[in-house]
Amino acid sequence: MSAMAEAVEQSEFILLGMSDTYKHSTNCQAEAEYAFKMKRRLIPLIMTKGYSPDGWLGFLIGSRIYIDFGRYDFEKACQLLLNEIHLQRKQALVATAARPVKTSIEDVPKPQLPPPPPPPPPKPIEKVSNSDAIIQKYSRRVVKRSYSTKSIEQWQDDDVLDFLADRKLYLMMPLCDGMNGLALLQLYKMCQLKVNDTYQLLNKELKESYKLTLLISVYTRFLSDCDSIITKKVNQTSIIPYRIPKYFPSDIIEIETEADPKVTLRMAQQHANNIPLFKQLMKKQNYYSKRYV
């Protein structure tokens, strides 16, 4: 069987000498079916006059042209066979690679199924703009609101970023990244002194470093939010404990406070009606400034 299978694999044409004996031979059937599976060129030959193939042999032959050796003399039949071989060689035939020789033709594997279709191409990755990337980076920040319990002078770098993220000032975050509270105060003072110049400076840095534009709305909200934090701090420290002795000189009033002298005078003006001798206090403004500055 191995030799028969190897002979089929190394052949281009297989001549099937059809007869009753051929049809009832198990080996001949196995050889013919194996040649059919290997897609070799099959040429059926009728060896017995008047023979008509049926059964598995008739199915295998199908509509193929066969050479009838029982009808023609041998030389003419051979010439017809050579013509058929020459004619079939002109037609393309898909070559089939030789398979490993099995112990028997019955063990020849069935033709493999066609390969599965290739997977669909991956979806194109959407390009993220610089602006979106900045917003995504800082908007995902988990905000810790511990900054609200500290004075702005005590803020660390993370407190500054938490403050800006809490107010959704994402475009200011890359500019203030690395600043502590004192640095933020200094930036705010620069904005107050030269609003337009500072905006141009910040906008230029944002464009050169991140290809972004600092929106006016973001800049003004930054100033407003910083102002609210600083004003809140001033209001919290503006409660001035004062003590007016029952008897005191007419030209000196002693005020004990840790507040800024200017804040002290501002509060004194607001509570002028409740503080005796306020006029004397205003006259001694320079005295207090020198004492507490």
Image (cartoon, helix red, strand yellow):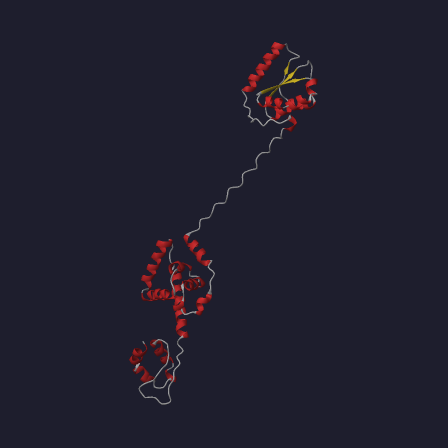
Name the outermost residue toward the bottom.
247
In the figure, 28 relative to 245: above or below?
above
Q: Residue at x 40, y 72 (%)?
A: 233
| Camera-side residue of 95 and 31 | 31
Q: Picture quarter containing residue 131?
A: bottom left
The C terminus is located in which quarter? bottom left
Residue at position x 33%, y 62% from top?
198
**Count of numbered marks:** 0
Query: Which of the two residues, 253 or 203, is positioned nearer the viewer here?
Result: 253
Q: Position of residue 117 (x, y in %)?
A: 55, 37
Where residue 257 sits in the image (x, y, percent)?
37, 79
Q: Is residue 81 left or right of residue 250?
A: right
| 53 in relation to 177, above or below | above
Vertically, is 232 above or below 66?
below
Among the 4 quarters of the image, the one containing residue 196: bottom left
Of residues 145 and 98, the one nearer the viewer is 98
Q: Which image quarter: residue 80? A: top right
Residue name at image x 63 percent, y 25 percent: 34
